[in-house]
Image (cartoon, rainbow, N blue to C red):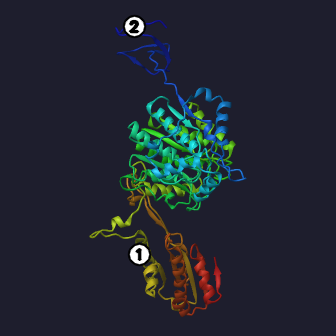
Amino acid sequence: MEDMEIDGTEAQPYVLIETGNLPITVGNRPIYTNGRYISKSTPTPLKSTKTGVVYDRRMRYHANIHEEEHHPEDPSRISSIQSMFKAAGCLEKMIPINAREVTKDEVRLVHTDEHWDFVAKTSALSEAQLGKVADDYNSIYVNKETALSARLSCGGVIELCKAVARGDVTNGFANVRPPGHHAEINEPMGFCFFNNVAVAAQCLKRDLKIEKVFILDWDIHHGNGTQKAFYNDPNVVYCSIHRYDNANFYPGDPQAGHTHVGNGPAKGKTINIPWPRPGMHDSDYIYAFNKVVMPIAYEFDPDIVIVSAGFDAAEGDPIGENHVTPAAFGHMTHMLKSLAAGKLVLALEGGYNLDSISNSALACVKVLLGEHPAKLGPIKPSQECVETIYQVIRVQSRYWSCLKPIYIDSAEEKVPGKLVIDIMDMVKLFRTRYLFSKLKMVPAPLAPERLANRFTDLVCCSNDLHCKDVIIFFVHDMADYRADTCATSNLTNLATSYMSDSVYQYIETIINQSYGIVDVDVPPPTNDTQKTDLHDLKDLLIFLWDHFVDYANPKKVVIIGAGRGCRSLMHCINDRGRYIFIS
């Protein structure tokens, strides 16, 4: 279409746009031709994605020379990934960022002088001395080239992060080794010598005045060194998704649990998502991203995102034993690209199956280059995943407004002058009153004091128990309490909360049959007193048997157990004789 003038404006190029029958106004009047409208063509050219890559073959010089067996942290890890990038045609689209050796001044932003000196001196040790050094530390090996490789690995991550922060490249992948996230302030561990990501983040803050850094660690192992480096820093969020197994999976640090959230002004800036078992899948990781990682990241609004990109959670890894596919790693990368104006750096950490790490890294790089991630199947998180995320949100919702507040801290509520009653006590009192008003059942007096304190208002019986030929000894779980909390607080919405007692109909039927009943409501155990609760419940049932059931001397006793009380009920039966038992 030729240039034209509309409403007296200067002639500009226009194009035809399909708009159906919707009116469009240019100036004060609609312009259209046969259902197609004329609009000024002012396309804004998209800024091309520039993806940097760091690789230096000298990082392969760090190799294990002290064991005959193959070591999982093998030099082939980075060469395999680099070969995959080249074979897929990605390298020719990427901008190489030269690795250089990290300086002592930079390392000292995270590590001690003594730690720097220790790593530097390894290059002058004999093989026997190197072997002894490896034995003295937690899960490392050392050769004469280790110090050089470690300096290049750390310096390479710094250079890529700075290139991204300055805008020289949009994003990038640091194909480096040895890894870094286990390295602590004063010692190497877990195949790591310098904490590459932590040092790079500190350099960004010092040298380029970057204010806020979001570090995501999706390596299967918890990044103990990175967490400790920023545990008191409110301007760095460290978020780790890792296998925990109740602190039984490496590094076996209880501080990898979800209750460790940072210190002082940095509370909430450490987010641990600890999987309780191996075998987690794509759905579990995507669910964690959608529920915790991305909401917090958006609220934090970082200036740059750095990923400790270990691929030992990938399908086929012999150490991680999880099942994350390349497609899922691609999707996680895609989501992270939406943060910090796309300033995203992936720095290699672990991953010990060459096929798995190469394919997973390739999936991430393709997304960095602008491709869409591969299609995922339906997202169906496991029960363990949902429970873990619930516990994480329960703790972190104190510190992040994007998470629905579900935390509970009765200690904060129990202040002088305030009446505080546990919901369980309210349920017990209501149920006792209801059973009395409807069925004339009465609370059973309990002794000794230990049982009375624990189970008062949880045991009711027929008021004429001694007159009954048949007594039902009924032990069951407490009624369910379904609470609906408000969206912006952890306050309960009373209008849509209720108690559901499924055993009431059984009690009513028993009473209507003119049987006697001893009804025992078993309370839910607390995590720290579960064994004590079971012991006390067994003593309670024996007490009730001796002082109510046996004392009433019925002709027949029917024992019914449902739920958590069955085991204690069996102990009671073993101690007091054989009777009819219905489970």
Find residue 129 and report its image quarter.
bottom right
Considering depth in this image, is 211 or 156 the residue closer to the camera?
156
Where does residue 455 sit, x and y in percent of width and height?
46, 80
Q: Residue furthest right?
A: 68
Q: Is residue 476 visible?
A: yes
Q: For residue 11, which numbered disc appears in the image?
A: 2
Q: Vertical placement of 502 versus 205: above or below?
A: below
Find residue 430 and report its image quarter.
bottom left
Q: Vertical placement of 71 versus 149: above or below?
A: below
Tag 1: residue type?
Leu
Kind of element beneath mark 2: loop
Q: Vertical placement of 566 versus 164: above or below?
A: below
Image side of residue 509 versus residue 232, left or right: right
Where does residue 541 sit, x and y in percent of width and height?
54, 84
Dividing the image into 4 quarters, which one contains the C terminus?
bottom right
**Residue at x-position 45% and y-position 86%:** 446
Q: Give the residue number, with chain letter if any, for mark 1.
A: 429
Considering depth in this image, is 380 or 99 the residue closer to the camera?
99
Where does residue 334 sit, x and y in percent of width and height?
54, 37
